[in-house]
Image (tube, rainbow, N blue to C red):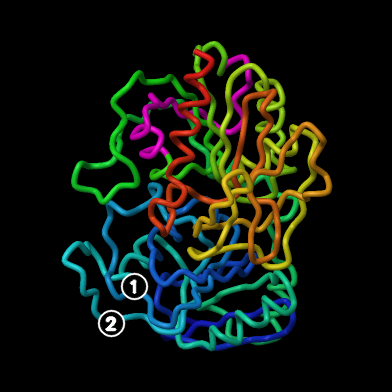
Amino acid sequence: MNDGRAWIALENGVVMEGRSIGAPGERSGDLVFNTAMSGYHEILTDPSYAGQTVLLTYPLIGNYGVAEEDAESHRAWAEGLVIRELSAIPSSHRANLGLGEWLRREGVVALDGVDTRRLTRLVREQGCLRCVISTEDGDADSLVTKARAAQGTEGRDLASLVTTDEVYTWDEGYHESYPNLLTPFAGTRIRCVAYDFGIKRNILRSLVHCGFDVTVVPAATPADDVLAMDPQAIFLSNGPGDPAAVEGGLAAVSDLVGKRPLFGICLGHQILSIVLGARTTKMPFGHHGANHPVRDLASGHVEITSQNHSFAVLEESLPDAVELSHINLNDQTVEGIRHPGARCFSVQYHPEAAPGPLDSAHLFRRFHELVGAGV
């Protein structure tokens, strides 16, 4: 069945019919809502969304089409997309494609014409819900059964599915005309190995922009292989899934802590926290959006941050040697840690995507200064 209709079904029994705006087919996974008003292309190409279906709360999506240079990776990773209404005409002069055409090209199953406000409230009130999106099956009972059988993100090492297959170098910073976070770095450059748990291109650009020469390695690269590259710094990237399940990354980081300065973002923050002795938990509905207020406890400054994570570090599990550095002002969850003795720190949010946009960019310079102090 593929007559322009599509359906979304949740594990709680809710089924909605809408219009197919993407590729034909059927996909399942955790349903997460994102509150950003723009950035749908970056969201869909962020490897951190692997295993998840994205529900956008802003009602009109696709207004500016898709500009290929804004992609955060080489492909779409989200399992599916749910929106209220697709804009018929992309209005930006930068657009290469309309969103609908891009979704079909990338094989993303998507629908519009459904009550996204109701879906968002269901997730907020009932917690994370597994779902299925289909253009092939219109039977409500069948769809609900599939949703209940869907594989969620808990216990899954999704980083191993999205990581690079081979080592590569990245030397692209921000273009001179880009309205960038910081002025380009002009001092001594630092050799940095970046673990790819699902790394975003703008993180790589930010590292290069702030003085790092970056070599990217697969998620399960052993510590000895990394140390053989003689890096001065090690970066732990964002990524999808359950941090406790990323066994290769956890083993490598455990062997690297204290041997080189480390900086982690998102999944990298969670992996570093576990290695240092903390625990993580799956959140009721996670943080996915571009307007989360975070307080830096050292300075007292509040940063408006971009976030995408379904797991969080438990504050009560932090060992005495690990300092809480940042907290979320909406729900008081852990947003950053540091271990001065091991010369490492991490944040849960995305400084490379700060909607400020200057709010969090200083963290890349902080990393450079941390490394430079010991060189």
- What kind of residue is marked 1? Gly
Gap between marks 1 and 2, in whole Å?
Answer: 9 Å
* Residues drawn in magenta: 204-225
Kindly identify the residue that appears in the image at 67 percent across and 41 percent down.
337
Kindly identify the residue that appears in the image at 57 percent across and 71 percent down.
33
Where's residue 258, x and y in %?
67, 20
218 drawn magenta: yes
- Please report whichever mark, 1 or 2, sits nearer to the chain's N-terminal start: 2
Total labels: the figure holds 2
Q: Say which residue label 1 marks.
A: 100
Kindly identify the residue that appears in the image at 72 percent across and 38 percent down.
323
At numbered mark 1, what does the secondary structure look like: helix, strand or loop?
A: helix
197 drawn magenta: no
Q: Closest to the observer: 128 or 350? A: 350
Where's residue 335, x and y in %?
64, 50
Where's residue 215, x and y in %?
43, 25
Tell me the crowding category of disc 2: few under 14, some 14 to 19, or many 20 or more residues within 10 angstroms, Cα based.
some
Where's residue 303, x and y in %?
51, 55
Kindly identify the residue that appears in the image at 46 percent across and 26 percent down.
167
- Vertical order, 62 against 320 (above or below): below
User: Does residue 349 appear left or right of residue 96 in this picture?
Assistant: right
Q: Closest to the observer: 178 or 143? A: 178
Do the residues under discs 1 and 2 have CB atoms within 8 angstroms?
no
- Vertical order, 320 against 309 (above or below): above
Which quarter of the picture shows residue 66? bottom left
Which quarter of the picture shows residue 86? bottom left
User: Does residue 207 appear left or right of residue 31 in this picture?
Assistant: left
The mark found on residue 174 in the picture is: none
- What kind of residue is marked 2? Ala
Tell me the crowding category of disc 1: few under 14, some 14 to 19, or many 20 or more residues within 10 angstroms, Cα based.
many
Depth check, mark 1 against mark 2: the one in front is: 2
Q: Say which residue label 2 marks.
A: 88
